[in-house]
Image (cartoon, rainbow, N blue to C red):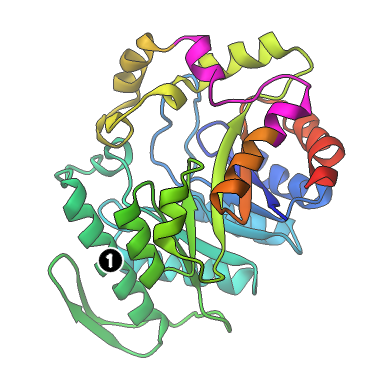
Amino acid sequence: MTELGFALSSEDHPPNELVRQAALAEEAGFGFCMISDHYHPWVDAQGQSPFVWSTLGAIAHATRTIRVGTGVTCPLIRQHPGLVAQAAATVAAMMPGRFFLGVGTGENLNEHVFGARWPLPDERVEMLEEAIEVMRLLWQGGEQTHRGRYYTVDHARVYTLPDERVEVYVAASKPNVAELAKHLGDGLISTAPDEDVVKAFGANGKPRIGMMHCAYDTDANKGLERATKLWPNLALEGPLGQDLATPSDFEEAAGMVDEEDVAESTPHGPDPKPYLELIGKYADAGFSHVYIHQIGENQDEFADFARRELMPRL
Protein backbone atom coordinates (compact mmCIF):
# COMPACT_ATOMS: atom_id res chain seq x y z
CA MET A 1 0.00 0.00 0.00
CA THR A 2 1.34 3.43 -0.97
CA GLU A 3 0.82 6.28 1.47
CA LEU A 4 -0.15 9.55 -0.20
CA GLY A 5 1.33 12.91 0.78
CA PHE A 6 0.66 16.56 -0.08
CA ALA A 7 3.32 18.96 -1.37
CA LEU A 8 3.41 22.44 0.14
CA SER A 9 5.07 24.38 -2.65
CA SER A 10 6.91 27.41 -1.28
CA GLU A 11 7.63 28.48 -4.85
CA ASP A 12 3.91 28.82 -5.63
CA HIS A 13 2.25 30.12 -2.48
CA PRO A 14 2.70 32.74 0.27
CA PRO A 15 3.26 31.52 3.83
CA ASN A 16 -0.26 31.90 5.24
CA GLU A 17 -1.65 29.94 2.29
CA LEU A 18 0.89 27.15 2.88
CA VAL A 19 -0.24 26.96 6.50
CA ARG A 20 -3.87 26.73 5.35
CA GLN A 21 -2.96 23.99 2.87
CA ALA A 22 -1.27 21.93 5.58
CA ALA A 23 -4.50 21.97 7.59
CA LEU A 24 -6.43 21.17 4.39
CA ALA A 25 -4.20 18.17 3.71
CA GLU A 26 -4.71 16.88 7.25
CA GLU A 27 -8.47 17.22 6.96
CA ALA A 28 -8.53 15.52 3.54
CA GLY A 29 -6.74 12.47 4.90
CA PHE A 30 -3.23 12.80 3.45
CA GLY A 31 -0.67 10.93 5.52
CA PHE A 32 2.06 13.56 5.41
CA CYS A 33 3.15 16.90 3.92
CA MET A 34 6.45 17.96 2.41
CA ILE A 35 7.37 21.64 2.23
CA SER A 36 10.02 22.98 -0.14
CA ASP A 37 12.92 25.07 1.16
CA HIS A 38 13.99 27.63 -1.45
CA TYR A 39 15.46 31.12 -1.57
CA HIS A 40 14.13 31.62 -5.13
CA PRO A 41 11.30 30.11 -7.15
CA TRP A 42 12.38 28.31 -10.31
CA VAL A 43 10.76 30.94 -12.57
CA ASP A 44 9.22 34.32 -11.81
CA ALA A 45 5.74 33.08 -12.76
CA GLN A 46 5.73 30.89 -9.64
CA GLY A 47 6.26 34.08 -7.69
CA GLN A 48 6.94 33.11 -4.05
CA SER A 49 9.70 31.96 -1.70
CA PRO A 50 8.83 32.32 2.01
CA PHE A 51 11.31 31.28 4.70
CA VAL A 52 10.51 27.68 5.46
CA TRP A 53 11.30 27.69 9.19
CA SER A 54 8.87 30.52 9.92
CA THR A 55 6.16 28.74 7.94
CA LEU A 56 6.79 25.46 9.75
CA GLY A 57 6.31 27.14 13.11
CA ALA A 58 2.84 28.22 12.04
CA ILE A 59 2.05 24.78 10.57
CA ALA A 60 2.92 23.22 13.92
CA HIS A 61 0.01 25.11 15.48
CA ALA A 62 -2.41 24.78 12.54
CA THR A 63 -2.22 20.96 12.45
CA ARG A 64 -2.52 18.20 15.02
CA THR A 65 -1.75 14.79 13.51
CA ILE A 66 -0.20 15.02 10.05
CA ARG A 67 3.53 14.39 9.65
CA VAL A 68 5.53 17.19 8.04
CA GLY A 69 8.97 17.15 6.44
CA THR A 70 11.15 19.51 4.46
CA GLY A 71 11.38 18.56 0.82
CA VAL A 72 14.22 19.33 0.90
CA THR A 73 16.61 21.51 2.91
CA CYS A 74 20.19 22.01 1.71
CA PRO A 75 22.38 22.28 4.85
CA LEU A 76 25.56 22.98 2.89
CA ILE A 77 26.10 26.61 1.89
CA ARG A 78 23.26 29.09 2.37
CA GLN A 79 22.36 27.44 5.67
CA HIS A 80 25.17 26.12 7.88
CA PRO A 81 24.37 22.65 9.23
CA GLY A 82 24.72 23.97 12.78
CA LEU A 83 21.95 26.46 12.10
CA VAL A 84 19.78 23.82 10.43
CA ALA A 85 20.31 21.58 13.45
CA GLN A 86 18.91 24.29 15.73
CA ALA A 87 16.01 25.11 13.40
CA ALA A 88 15.01 21.46 12.90
CA ALA A 89 15.22 20.73 16.62
CA THR A 90 12.92 23.68 17.36
CA VAL A 91 10.31 22.57 14.82
CA ALA A 92 10.51 18.97 16.05
CA ALA A 93 9.91 20.23 19.60
CA MET A 94 6.86 22.15 18.37
CA MET A 95 5.28 19.13 16.66
CA PRO A 96 6.38 16.11 18.72
CA GLY A 97 6.77 12.94 16.71
CA ARG A 98 5.53 14.59 13.52
CA PHE A 99 8.53 16.37 11.95
CA PHE A 100 11.33 14.95 9.82
CA LEU A 101 14.17 16.77 8.10
CA GLY A 102 14.61 16.09 4.40
CA VAL A 103 18.09 17.07 3.17
CA GLY A 104 19.81 17.18 -0.19
CA THR A 105 22.73 18.65 -2.07
CA GLY A 106 20.71 21.62 -3.30
CA GLU A 107 20.68 23.82 -6.37
CA ASN A 108 22.83 26.75 -7.46
CA LEU A 109 19.55 28.67 -7.82
CA ASN A 110 19.34 28.96 -4.02
CA GLU A 111 22.87 28.43 -2.75
CA HIS A 112 24.88 31.05 -4.65
CA VAL A 113 22.93 34.00 -3.26
CA PHE A 114 25.47 35.08 -0.63
CA GLY A 115 28.45 34.85 -2.95
CA ALA A 116 29.63 31.31 -2.25
CA ARG A 117 31.18 29.17 -4.96
CA TRP A 118 28.89 26.44 -6.32
CA PRO A 119 30.77 23.18 -5.61
CA LEU A 120 31.12 20.25 -7.99
CA PRO A 121 28.70 17.33 -7.57
CA ASP A 122 31.15 15.04 -5.75
CA GLU A 123 32.07 17.86 -3.35
CA ARG A 124 28.42 18.46 -2.55
CA VAL A 125 27.93 14.80 -1.66
CA GLU A 126 30.95 14.97 0.68
CA MET A 127 29.58 18.18 2.19
CA LEU A 128 26.18 16.58 2.78
CA GLU A 129 27.77 13.63 4.56
CA GLU A 130 29.68 15.94 6.90
CA ALA A 131 26.64 18.20 7.39
CA ILE A 132 24.55 15.24 8.60
CA GLU A 133 27.39 14.32 10.97
CA VAL A 134 27.43 17.88 12.37
CA MET A 135 23.66 17.99 12.90
CA ARG A 136 23.54 14.63 14.64
CA LEU A 137 26.44 15.67 16.86
CA LEU A 138 24.55 18.77 18.00
CA TRP A 139 21.34 16.81 18.54
CA GLN A 140 23.16 14.69 21.11
CA GLY A 141 22.96 17.69 23.43
CA GLY A 142 25.71 19.24 25.48
CA GLU A 143 28.55 21.42 24.26
CA GLN A 144 30.00 20.17 21.01
CA THR A 145 33.00 21.02 18.84
CA HIS A 146 33.59 19.83 15.28
CA ARG A 147 36.47 20.75 13.00
CA GLY A 148 36.02 19.05 9.66
CA ARG A 149 36.96 19.52 6.05
CA TYR A 150 34.00 21.76 5.28
CA TYR A 151 32.44 22.85 8.60
CA THR A 152 33.51 24.11 11.99
CA VAL A 153 31.37 24.13 15.11
CA ASP A 154 33.07 25.76 18.08
CA HIS A 155 31.76 24.85 21.56
CA ALA A 156 28.14 25.03 20.44
CA ARG A 157 25.11 23.64 22.20
CA VAL A 158 21.53 23.28 20.98
CA TYR A 159 19.57 23.72 24.18
CA THR A 160 16.04 23.24 22.81
CA LEU A 161 15.82 19.62 21.74
CA PRO A 162 12.78 17.42 21.04
CA ASP A 163 12.09 14.39 23.22
CA GLU A 164 12.49 12.12 20.18
CA ARG A 165 15.48 12.29 17.87
CA VAL A 166 15.13 14.20 14.61
CA GLU A 167 14.82 11.81 11.68
CA VAL A 168 16.84 12.71 8.56
CA TYR A 169 15.63 11.67 5.11
CA VAL A 170 18.20 12.02 2.32
CA ALA A 171 17.25 13.09 -1.21
CA ALA A 172 18.88 11.14 -4.02
CA SER A 173 18.47 11.07 -7.78
CA LYS A 174 21.50 8.80 -8.39
CA PRO A 175 22.44 5.45 -6.89
CA ASN A 176 25.68 6.80 -5.35
CA VAL A 177 23.76 9.29 -3.21
CA ALA A 178 21.18 6.62 -2.41
CA GLU A 179 24.08 4.58 -1.01
CA LEU A 180 24.86 7.52 1.28
CA ALA A 181 21.20 7.69 2.27
CA LYS A 182 21.30 3.96 3.07
CA HIS A 183 24.04 4.46 5.64
CA LEU A 184 23.20 7.91 7.02
CA GLY A 185 19.50 8.47 6.44
CA ASP A 186 16.32 7.41 8.19
CA GLY A 187 14.54 7.53 4.83
CA LEU A 188 14.95 8.23 1.11
CA ILE A 189 13.44 11.02 -1.01
CA SER A 190 13.53 11.06 -4.81
CA THR A 191 11.76 12.76 -7.69
CA ALA A 192 11.51 9.96 -10.25
CA PRO A 193 10.30 6.33 -10.12
CA ASP A 194 13.87 5.04 -10.50
CA GLU A 195 14.21 1.42 -9.38
CA ASP A 196 18.03 1.64 -9.36
CA VAL A 197 17.92 4.42 -6.76
CA VAL A 198 15.63 2.38 -4.51
CA LYS A 199 17.80 -0.73 -4.93
CA ALA A 200 20.89 1.25 -3.91
CA PHE A 201 19.04 2.45 -0.82
CA GLY A 202 18.16 -1.12 0.04
CA ALA A 203 15.27 -3.10 1.44
CA ASN A 204 15.83 -1.92 5.00
CA GLY A 205 12.28 -1.08 6.09
CA LYS A 206 12.95 2.65 6.00
CA PRO A 207 10.49 5.01 4.23
CA ARG A 208 11.12 5.62 0.53
CA ILE A 209 9.35 8.78 -0.62
CA GLY A 210 8.79 9.74 -4.25
CA MET A 211 7.60 13.13 -5.49
CA MET A 212 5.31 13.67 -8.47
CA HIS A 213 3.73 16.75 -10.02
CA CYS A 214 0.23 17.17 -11.42
CA ALA A 215 -2.16 19.84 -12.63
CA TYR A 216 -5.63 18.69 -11.65
CA ASP A 217 -8.41 20.58 -13.40
CA THR A 218 -11.88 19.77 -14.63
CA ASP A 219 -10.54 20.92 -18.03
CA ALA A 220 -7.45 18.89 -18.97
CA ASN A 221 -6.26 21.49 -21.51
CA LYS A 222 -6.36 24.24 -18.90
CA GLY A 223 -4.46 22.08 -16.44
CA LEU A 224 -1.71 21.34 -18.93
CA GLU A 225 -1.51 24.98 -20.01
CA ARG A 226 -1.15 26.06 -16.39
CA ALA A 227 1.54 23.47 -15.67
CA THR A 228 3.56 24.53 -18.72
CA LYS A 229 3.34 28.21 -17.80
CA LEU A 230 4.13 27.86 -14.10
CA TRP A 231 6.46 24.83 -14.02
CA PRO A 232 8.30 24.51 -17.36
CA ASN A 233 11.36 23.44 -15.35
CA LEU A 234 9.71 20.01 -14.98
CA ALA A 235 10.78 19.16 -18.51
CA LEU A 236 14.40 20.36 -18.26
CA GLU A 237 16.81 17.44 -18.39
CA GLY A 238 20.37 16.85 -17.25
CA PRO A 239 22.27 19.04 -14.76
CA LEU A 240 20.42 22.27 -15.59
CA GLY A 241 18.19 21.95 -12.52
CA GLN A 242 21.22 21.98 -10.23
CA ASP A 243 23.50 24.39 -12.06
CA LEU A 244 21.45 27.31 -13.39
CA ALA A 245 21.79 30.33 -11.11
CA THR A 246 18.67 32.49 -11.39
CA PRO A 247 14.96 32.29 -12.25
CA SER A 248 15.72 34.23 -15.44
CA ASP A 249 18.17 31.50 -16.46
CA PHE A 250 15.43 28.91 -16.01
CA GLU A 251 13.00 31.05 -18.00
CA GLU A 252 15.46 31.23 -20.88
CA ALA A 253 16.03 27.47 -20.79
CA ALA A 254 12.27 26.92 -20.58
CA GLY A 255 11.91 28.45 -24.03
CA MET A 256 12.74 24.95 -25.30
CA VAL A 257 9.81 23.42 -23.39
CA ASP A 258 6.32 22.98 -24.79
CA GLU A 259 3.10 21.44 -23.49
CA GLU A 260 3.90 18.05 -24.98
CA ASP A 261 7.14 17.90 -22.96
CA VAL A 262 5.35 18.71 -19.69
CA ALA A 263 2.49 16.32 -20.43
CA GLU A 264 4.84 13.33 -20.52
CA SER A 265 5.51 13.49 -16.77
CA THR A 266 2.60 15.53 -15.39
CA PRO A 267 -0.91 14.09 -15.03
CA HIS A 268 -3.56 16.73 -15.68
CA GLY A 269 -7.30 16.93 -16.00
CA PRO A 270 -10.16 15.13 -14.19
CA ASP A 271 -9.41 11.49 -15.10
CA PRO A 272 -7.82 9.69 -12.11
CA LYS A 273 -6.24 7.01 -14.30
CA PRO A 274 -3.01 8.90 -15.26
CA TYR A 275 -2.46 9.90 -11.62
CA LEU A 276 -2.91 6.32 -10.42
CA GLU A 277 -0.66 4.99 -13.17
CA LEU A 278 2.17 7.30 -12.15
CA ILE A 279 1.71 6.46 -8.47
CA GLY A 280 1.81 2.81 -9.53
CA LYS A 281 5.17 3.35 -11.26
CA TYR A 282 6.59 4.63 -7.98
CA ALA A 283 5.13 1.66 -6.12
CA ASP A 284 6.57 -0.76 -8.69
CA ALA A 285 9.99 0.88 -8.30
CA GLY A 286 9.86 0.23 -4.56
CA PHE A 287 8.64 3.51 -3.08
CA SER A 288 6.50 3.25 0.05
CA HIS A 289 5.23 6.86 -0.04
CA VAL A 290 4.37 9.31 -2.82
CA TYR A 291 3.66 13.00 -2.35
CA ILE A 292 1.94 15.08 -4.99
CA HIS A 293 2.57 18.67 -5.97
CA GLN A 294 -0.59 20.20 -7.41
CA ILE A 295 0.31 23.06 -9.75
CA GLY A 296 -2.06 26.02 -9.47
CA GLU A 297 -4.31 27.84 -7.04
CA ASN A 298 -7.06 25.18 -6.98
CA GLN A 299 -5.59 23.28 -4.04
CA ASP A 300 -8.98 22.62 -2.42
CA GLU A 301 -10.33 21.06 -5.62
CA PHE A 302 -7.27 18.85 -5.87
CA ALA A 303 -7.49 17.77 -2.22
CA ASP A 304 -11.12 16.77 -2.74
CA PHE A 305 -10.22 14.93 -5.97
CA ALA A 306 -7.45 13.02 -4.19
CA ARG A 307 -9.76 12.12 -1.31
CA ARG A 308 -12.50 10.86 -3.65
CA GLU A 309 -10.58 9.33 -6.55
CA LEU A 310 -7.05 8.47 -5.45
CA MET A 311 -6.92 7.52 -1.76
CA PRO A 312 -9.65 4.83 -1.92
CA ARG A 313 -7.75 3.07 -4.71
CA LEU A 314 -4.43 3.01 -2.89
Q: Residues within 10 Å of mark 1 (few under 14, many from 20)?
A: many
Q: Which residue is mark 1?
A: 129
Q: Secondary structure under badge 1?
A: helix
- 122 horizontally vs 141: left or right: left
Give the quarter of the figure containing the N terminus.
Answer: bottom right
- 267 horizontally vs 302: left or right: left
Q: Nearer the viewer, residue 132 or 264?
A: 264
- 228 horizontally vs 246: left or right: right
In the rendered image, residue 132, in percent from the top left (x then y), is placed at 33, 69
In the rendered image, residue 174, in percent from the top left (x then y), is placed at 34, 48
Name the residue rendered at 36%, 9% in the picture: 255
In the rendered image, residue 172, in percent from the top left (x then y), is placed at 39, 52
Name the residue rendered at 53%, 21% in the picture: 264
Using the rendered view, name the quadrant where residue 273 is placed: top right
Depicted 167 relative to depicted 63: above or below: below
In the rendered image, residue 78, in percent from the top left (x then y), is placed at 29, 51
Using the rendered view, name the quadrant where residue 95 is placed: bottom right
Q: Which residues are magenta?
A: 258-276
Name the residue rendered at 81%, 33% in the picture: 305
Q: Nearer the viewer, residue 69 or 257?
A: 257
Using the rendered view, name the quadrant where residue 300 is placed: top right
Depicted 42 relative to depicted 207: above or below: above
Residue type, label 1: Glu
Q: Nearer the viewer, residue 113 or 283?
A: 283
- 105 horizontally vs 65: left or right: left
Q: Is residue 275 magenta?
A: yes
Q: Is residue 178 magenta?
A: no
Question: How many numbered dots are placed on residues in this image?
Answer: 1
Name the residue rendered at 40%, 67% in the picture: 182
